[in-house]
Image: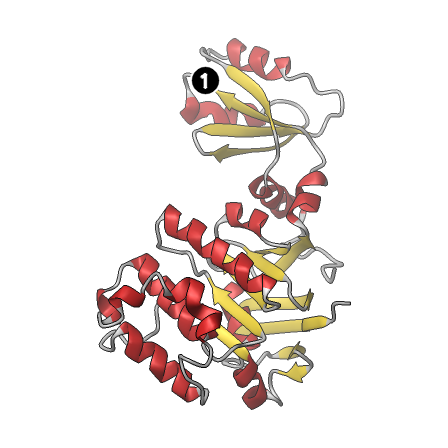
Amino acid sequence: MNHSAVILQNLSKSYKTVKALTEINVTINKGELFGFIGPDGAGKTTLFRILTTLLNPDTGTATIEGLNTVKDYKSIRNIVGYMPGRFSLYQDLTVEENLKFFASIYKTTIEENYHLISDIYKHIEPFKHRKAGKLSGGMKQKLALSCALIHKPEVLFLDEPTTGVDAVSRMEFWEMLKKLRSQGITILVSTPYMDEAALCDRVALMQNGHIMTIDTPDAIIGAFPVKIYTVRSNRMYHLLNELQTIPETEAVYRFGDVVHYLNHSETFDPMIITRHLDAIGHTEIVVKQAVPTIEDSFMLYMRKSDKFNIPGNDN
């Protein structure tokens, strides 16, 4: 039976007048791949810095494997791996030198724990004599992950690990995370990419230092309360404002190269959209029902939450 690997209770943190985190409550199970999803400024990095003992919270508590992040910070640093958002390894050391250095900090060796990183490290081992600063984004990412894993951590924290890398490297990286999870490592990932939410066991949607909801990706999408329609016309620039004037409109927002339209009337007929736009001079009107995504859920929670503070975010 799973026990809780990470427990956050009423965690808050401010920087002078800016409230970075407000009353964060989360329980993460051992062996879970858990995602904190939200844009820049949501509070993800502050949260990870608290969990990895680099910052103290103003109020509330955080425990990692039963250890308090403030009182037991030395013990926690031995059992967690941390990959910060910015590449923070030594640019002037080679790939191999960086890995040896991190292994030596934790009084281990590359050889002792090679089995932990072999799937990841094999991609960059042919370049082990290359300086880290000369690596591509995807290779830097693999080296940073190898260094975070070399001491066999129980909990792994990855702060926006796929930002700035190409789509293929992003996909490879998530495949690596799935393999690591199968070894029993608890993994916490933060990301601004909504599509990565679907790759997690559970996610917390974050905005402005608040958690808006916590659940499995499927459950969040399954709970979407209204129908979504994609809308296109010859006057895309005007669509946002002109769709807002339809009675009982719930939300209108850009979504890629279309506009998503939501209406909270249970008997809503999408022909109303076509007739409305036709009457004010739009042509080439295309309206289709769409399947909701995590991004749609995020947009709706943002609208419905009171200053992004939804009670009961301790699922």
Colouring of the image? secondary structure
Check the picture and name the quadrant holding the C terminus. bottom right
Check the picture and name the quadrant holding the N terminus. bottom right
Residue 4, image x, y percentages: 71, 71
Residue 142, image x, y percentages: 38, 64
Q: In which quarter of the image is residue 90?
A: bottom left
Q: Can residue 42 be seen in this view?
A: no
Tag 1's secondary structure?
loop
Query: Which residue is at the front of the view, 163 or 262?
Result: 163
- Residue assigned mark 1: 233
Query: Which residue is rendered at x = 48% and y = 50% of the image?
Result: 193
In-image side of 296 versus 40 (left or right) = right
Query: Which residue is rendered at x = 51% and y = 59% of the image?
Result: 177
Residue 35, image x, y percentages: 58, 58
In-image side of 281 versus 28 (left or right) = left
Amino acid under disc 1: Ser
Q: In which quarter of the image is residue 74?
A: bottom right
Q: Residues within 10 Å of mark 1 (few under 14, many from 20)?
A: some
Query: Which residue is at the front of the view, 106 or 122?
Result: 122
Give above or below for 65 relative to 307.
below
Query: Which residue is at the front of the view, 2 or 37?
Result: 2
Residue 161, image x, y percentages: 43, 61
